[in-house]
């Protein structure tokens, strides 16, 4: 028997059906009040027509059977007309005709609330509030909608696509429907999904009202920068140019995309000549313009003086009392400026102020960033436990926000790697930094972040792969810093290079590069950078030949300067203590050397700082065996820690010997050589390195041969001359 399907036909089409015209079954979906109702009940139609309601007309998965393609229901929603097109391979034709068919045949027959629900559900599922407003306590029975855990959704992908096509021509839908849909979106929808739908319907004014209520200029920080990009594009440049909130949202979006110079151009086009120094400036009534200018300055300009940074707080007076996000950004920019200049106490205080403001403004995304900055500060102050807790909370807030945009997980991962480095777990540090740096070019970054990456990842690369790999890592950081932030060559990165040569025990090259640096124009360093440079210079002086004319005077001056440094943190104090112990040991002041060494080791043990001890391994290799042999009363636990450090140093690869000056000399031979130049006997060297005396003699014979000398004194002199020992 052949079957025909008529969807709510008129009476004329039914009258044309002749009884007895062959085996035929007509399935009619109609309403009891339809125009064809009377015809359908004529006796002559009995047996030919099966009358069903619309709900019964739509088929289910059970009706289709297990062997039918499951994509049919997803595409058609069970609508027989569409199922027939799917099975008959008329998909393209049907999809093309469906928008006009819906507009002409279907939508006019549906209740207005159902039509509104169909268009609202294009953007997102209808939640309980929207359903109650549209349908009251009774759930709608339209087969094109189905209930899910998230709310009412469209059952057919084809119908959804057709409705979206209709939405592109708002005039077809009529003003009452557009206003109803826009109103439901505005009061019940999620802005990130609602706004594109409103813009697609040509409701830009209504969309702007929703945008303002949803955060306005700070929309991206509350709802995500990916949807913000599409929303701004939907409004277009004309709306953006005449609406402040859209303009500032675009500026912060450009900053997030790693385009601070483009952001500055957009800002300057509307507000030319905004200053960074606000001390003697009469501020306008446009606080967001000033705030955007300060935020951009963090990305592409040198860190300003502390007095200028403090002047930024004047912007806060222009802000509404309840604008917590803007207030947080004021504190945020000030905290980063102080962090860049190494003024950690001020940076920490302001970071906590920003964190509190972000939490009151209900932005877990921004709060996570401040926790990352607090972790950075804690790491610089060698407070590993605090840094770990800050990073844990930052990760939780980032996940809770659901707003990961580009580099956020990478930044958290990098700081976790810094923690691993400081704890001596070099295997947990990334082996390749290129992906991280490439991401920073297109996303969130700040100049101090890249310098910090260089200072730690390069050292980790040194222990894994040697000096060449470490220096290449620094060069990558230099290039990224210039491309991303337009910064001039950073003196801090130059100091990192010198430090790498020192760790590699290539002191002559380190001194030469330091001399070259002194010929360059002076560049302001952060407070911590000044300490790092002074420590590098101190190591350089310690490594000079003992006969240098003014070595002692220079060392004394450096020691005095370092002792007076207010920015001296725990990590610096540990290094300084080890260097002082080395100087006392060299002068035969063993009691003073032991005291300084024990103080440095206690600080390192209490904070779990092993990375700094490894960096000072050249000096500890000589000092630790003495402590282990004679720890002194009450220092047995410290001796155990010293043994752990010795073991860590011995397990490191022989990367420090990759030098033309030490080519052919094994790591163990180099260790023997360093003790010999300090005047140790064979027995003392054997005890220090836990070797037999015969093994020490074996290494010495190899050294005599390789350096072409025949006495211990000549060997020591040749080693110093070639820069192999200090």
Image (cartoon, helix red, strand yellow):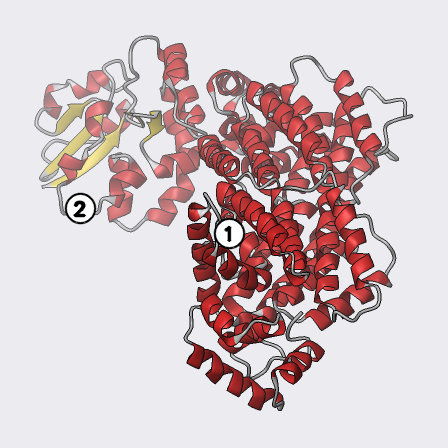
Residue 384 drawn at (x, y percent): 52, 40
Residue 286 drawn at (x, y percent): 79, 23
Q: Is residue 159 left or right of residue 724?
A: left
Residue at x 39%, y 43% (from the top left corner): 95
Quadrant hosting residue 71 = top left
Q: Nearer the viewer, residue 487 or 642?
A: 642
Look at the image and tell me whether residue 216 can be seen. Answer: no
Residue at x 50%, y 50% (from the top left corner): 417
Assign the N terminus to one quadrant of the image.
top left
Task: Using a 10 Å C-alpha cutoff, classify the residue at mark 2 as few (fewer than 14 neighbours), some (14 to 19) or many (20 or more).
Answer: few
Q: Nearer the viewer, residue 547 or 647?
A: 547
Assign the C terminus to one quadrant of the image.
bottom right
Which numbered circle lies on residue 610? 1
Extreme top residue here?
137
Residue 23 drawn at (x, y percent): 9, 39
- Which residue is under mark 2? 68
Quadrant hosting residue 542 = bottom right
The image shows residue 717, relative to residue 286, as above or below, that is below
Q: Nearer the viewer, residue 402 or 645?
A: 645
Task: Using a 10 Å C-alpha cutoff, classify the residue at mark 1 as few (fewer than 14 neighbours), some (14 to 19) or many (20 or more).
Answer: many
Q: Nearer the viewer, residue 358 or 639?
A: 639
Q: Is residue 274 left or right of residue 159?
A: right
Label 2 secondary element: loop
The image shows residue 21, relative to residue 489, as above or below, that is above
Residue at x 84%, y 63% (from the top left corner): 550
The image shows residue 232, relative to residue 8, as above or below, that is below
Label 1 secondary element: loop
Residue 24 drawn at (x, y percent): 12, 37
Q: Mark 1 near mark 2, Cβ–Cβ under 8 Å?
A: no
- Going from the N terminus, do you reach mark 1 or mark 2 first? 2
């Amino acid at each position: 028997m052949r079957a025909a399907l008529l969807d709510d036909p008129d009476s004329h089409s039914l009258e044309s059906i002749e009884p007895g015209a062959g085996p035929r079954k007509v399935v009619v979906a109609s309403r009891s009040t339809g125009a064809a109702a009377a015809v359908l009940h004529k006796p002559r139609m009995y047996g030919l027509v099966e009358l069903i309601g619309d709900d019964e007309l739509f088929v289910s998965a059970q009706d289709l059977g297990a062997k039918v393609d499951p994509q049919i229901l997803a595409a058609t929603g069970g609508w027989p007309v569409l199922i027939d097109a799917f099975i008959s391979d008329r998909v393209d034709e049907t999809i093309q005709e469906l928008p006009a068919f819906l507009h002409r045949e279907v939508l006019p027959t549906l209740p207005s609330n159902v039509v509104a629900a169909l268009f609202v559900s294009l953007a997102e599922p209808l939640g309980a509030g929207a359903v109650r407003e549209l349908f009251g306590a009774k759930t709608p029975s339209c087969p094109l909608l189905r209930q899910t855990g998230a709310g009412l959704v469209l059952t057919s992908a084809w119908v959804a696509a057709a409705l979206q096509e209709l939405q592109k021509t708002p005039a077809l839908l009529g003003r009452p429907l557009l206003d109803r849909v826009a109103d439901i979106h505005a009061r019940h929808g999620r802005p990130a999904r609602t706004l594109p739908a409103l813009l697609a319907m040509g409701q830009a004014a209504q969309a702007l009202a929703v945008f303002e209520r949803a955060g306005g200029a700070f929309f991206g920080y509350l709802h995500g920068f990916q949807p913000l990009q599409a929303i701004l594009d939907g409004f277009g440049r004309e709306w953006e140019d005449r609406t402040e909130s859209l303009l500032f949202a675009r500026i912060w979006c450009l900053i997030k995309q790693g385009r601070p110079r483009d952001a500055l151009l957009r800002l300057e086009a509307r507000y030319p000549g905004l200053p960074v120094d606000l001390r003697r400036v009469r501020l306008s009534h446009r606080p967001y313009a000033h705030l955007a200018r300060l935020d951009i300055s963090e990305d592409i300009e040198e860190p300003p003086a502390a007095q200028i940074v403090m002047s930024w707080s004047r912007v806060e007076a222009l802000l509404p009392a309840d604008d917590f996000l803007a207030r947080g950004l004021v504190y945020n920019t000030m905290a980063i400026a102080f962090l860049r200049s190494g003024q950690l106490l001020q940076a920490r205080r302001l970071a906590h102020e920003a964190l509190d403001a972000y939490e009151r403004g209900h932005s877990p995304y921004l709060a996570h960033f401040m926790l990352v900055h607090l972790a950075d500060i804690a790491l610089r102050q060698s407070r590993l436990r605090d840094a770990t807790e800050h990073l844990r909370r930052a990760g939780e807030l980032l996940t809770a926000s659901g707003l990961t945009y580009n580099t956020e997980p990478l930044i958290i991962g990098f700081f976790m790697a810094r923690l691993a480095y400081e704890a001596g777990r070099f295997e947990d540090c990334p082996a390749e930094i290129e992906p991280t740096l490439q991401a920073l070019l297109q996303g969130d970054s700040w100049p101090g972040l890249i310098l910090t990456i260089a200072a730690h990842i390069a050292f980790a690369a040194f222990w894994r792969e040697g000096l060449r790999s470490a220096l290449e890592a620094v060069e990558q950081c230099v290039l990224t810093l210039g491309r991303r932030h337009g910064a001039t060559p950073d003196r801090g990165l130059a100091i990192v290079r010198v430090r790498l040569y020192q760790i590699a025990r290539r002191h002559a090259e380190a001194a030469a590069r330091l001399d070259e640096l002194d010929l360059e124009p002076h560049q302001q360093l952060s407070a911590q950078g000044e300490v790092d440079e002074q420590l590098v210079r101190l190591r350089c002086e310690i490594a000079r030949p003992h006969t240098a004319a003014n070595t002692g005077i220079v060392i004394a001056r450096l020691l005095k300067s370092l002792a007076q440094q207010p920015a001296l943190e725990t990590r610096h104090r540990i290094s300084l203590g080890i260097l002082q112990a080395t100087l006392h040991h060299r002068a035969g002041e063993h009691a003073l050397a032991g005291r300084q060494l024990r103080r440095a080791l206690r600080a390192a043990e209490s904070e779990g700082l092993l990375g700094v001890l490894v960096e000072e391994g050249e000096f500890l290799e000589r000092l630790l065996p003495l402590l282990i042999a004679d720890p002194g009363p009450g220092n047995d636990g410290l001796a155990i820690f010293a043994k752990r450090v010795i073991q860590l140093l011995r397990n490191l690869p022989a990367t420090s010997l990759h030098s033309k000056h030490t080519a052919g000399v094994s790591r163990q031979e180099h260790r023997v050589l360093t003790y010999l130049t300090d005047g140790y006997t064979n027995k003392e060297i054997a005890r220090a390195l836990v070797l037999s005396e015969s093994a020490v003699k074996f290494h010495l014979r190899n050294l005599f041969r390789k350096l072409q000398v025949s006495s211990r004194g000549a060997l020591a002199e040749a080693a110093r001359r070639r820069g192999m020992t200090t």
